[in-house]
Structures are given as structure tokens and as C-alpha cells.
Amino acid sequence: MSRIGQMPITVPSGVQVSRDNGVLTVKGPKGTLTREIHPSINVRLEDDKIVCERPSDAKPHRALHGLTRTLINNMIVGVTQGYEKKLQIIGVGYRAEMQGKNLVISVGYSHPVTVEPMEGITFEVGQETNNRVPFIWVRGIDKEVVGQQAAEIRRIKPPEPYKFVVSQGMHGKGIRYADEVVRKKVGKAGAAGKK
């Protein structure tokens, strides 16, 4: 048995769960999420619990069992607590600012980069006082969308493992996740000693 798949999901108070034609809808204080459930997995609503059942122990059904349970749990966490990702901007003169709902990032290109939020996403910009590092919060109720939006922002200027920013005392010039570890790489020795 899938140890994750067989665990029932507790539905907190204030959250409404309904299923119609294979589409699961979860309503909560922060919003509403819908997801199509694979027809192989049976999702039962029992009072304040959701139980996922699979038809057999075949490998595809075992994989879908745990996946479906996790996706439903993520929906419930999203509509009650929400999700967020924190990104740091490392580099002298690198910064981010808000223009309405859009995020404008200046990271050494000839022009600032404007990022429009996906549906259900909000941005917040700030600066850490201890090391003056600008940061961006990406918030939303859909875990997948929050992760996708954060990855697209990071892709604008991925951390550079060869560069060290003296003023901020950090390796990895560029945009990175707050909990990301950037391993320093040593540059080439150059042509010294070669003939």
C-alpha cells in the first residue's frame, strides 16, 4: 500500500470540498481551486475527511494513489494557508520594485525586466536590513503556479557561481531562492605558465 495515498486528508473547518464529473473543487478563506482527478483513483468525501482509493496494486495505480492524495492535500493547504517563495537578488546595483501589480527587476541588463504576475499571484518587494539584500516574495494559493512563477523570475538572472559580491558578502551574483546554496567555483588559472 502507498503509505502516503492511504492517509486520510482532514478537511479543516471553513473549507468546502465538492466533486462533480471527476473535477474536485476546494473552497476556502483564501480562494477556490479546482483539479481534474484521474478516473482510476476513487476519491470519497466522508464528513470532515477525504479518502483516496486505488483499484489495484499495479504500478501505475500505486503511483497515482500517492500523487492524487498529495495534490488534494496541497489544494487544501493552499486555500487555508497559501504558499510563498522568497527570492534574493545578489549584486551591486541589482534591485526590484513594484509598478502596480507588475514586478520590475534591474539586474545588469541594458533595460529593466518587467514580470507580469500569473493569475492568482501577488508580489512583494523588500530589503533585508542585516546585509542590504533585496528580496521578492511570490505568493499564491496554487503551489504549482507559485513554484512556476518563482522559477521564471530566477531564470532572468540565475546565480553565477564564479562571482563574489563583496558589499553583500555572498557568492552567486544573480537571483536565487532564499534557501538555495550556491557552491563557489574557482575560475580558470588563465594562460600563466603556458608557452
Image (cartoon, rainbow, N blue to C red):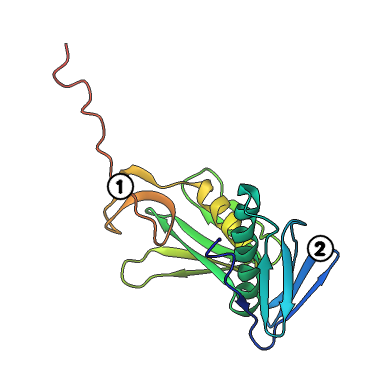
**Disc 2 or disc 1, which is closer to the eye?**
2
Q: Quick check: 114 above or below 44?
A: above
Q: Residue 18 placed where, x, y %?
A: 79, 75
Q: Quadrant of the C terminus?
A: top left
At a point 86% along the width and 64% down the height, the residue shown is: 21
- Which is nearer the eye, 192 or 140? 140
Q: Residue furthest right?
A: 21
* Residue 22, numbered circle: 2
Q: Quick check: 40 above or below 128?
A: above
On the image, which quarter does residue 30 sit in?
bottom right
The residue that label 1 is drawn on is: 183
At a point 77% along the width and 68% down the height, the residue shown is: 24
Q: Amino acid at mark 1?
A: Arg
Q: Quick check: 119 above or below 15?
A: above
- Which is nearer the eye, 62 or 135? 62
Q: Residue 77 placed where, x, y %?
A: 60, 74
At a point 47% along the width and 50% down the height, the residue shown is: 107
Q: Are marks 2 and 1 in contact (CB under 8 Å)?
A: no
Q: Amino acid at mark 2?
A: Gly
**Does any portion of residue 60 appear in the rendered image?**
yes
* Residue 191, numbered circle: none
At a point 68% along the width and 83% down the height, the residue shown is: 29
Upstream in sequence: badge 2 or badge 1: 2
Left or right: 84 with respect to 172? right
Left or right: 102 with respect to 189? right
Q: Residue furthest bottom?
A: 13
Q: Quadrant of the N terminus?
A: bottom right
Q: Residue 67 placed where, x, y %?
A: 61, 58
Q: Residue 160 placed where, x, y %?
A: 38, 44
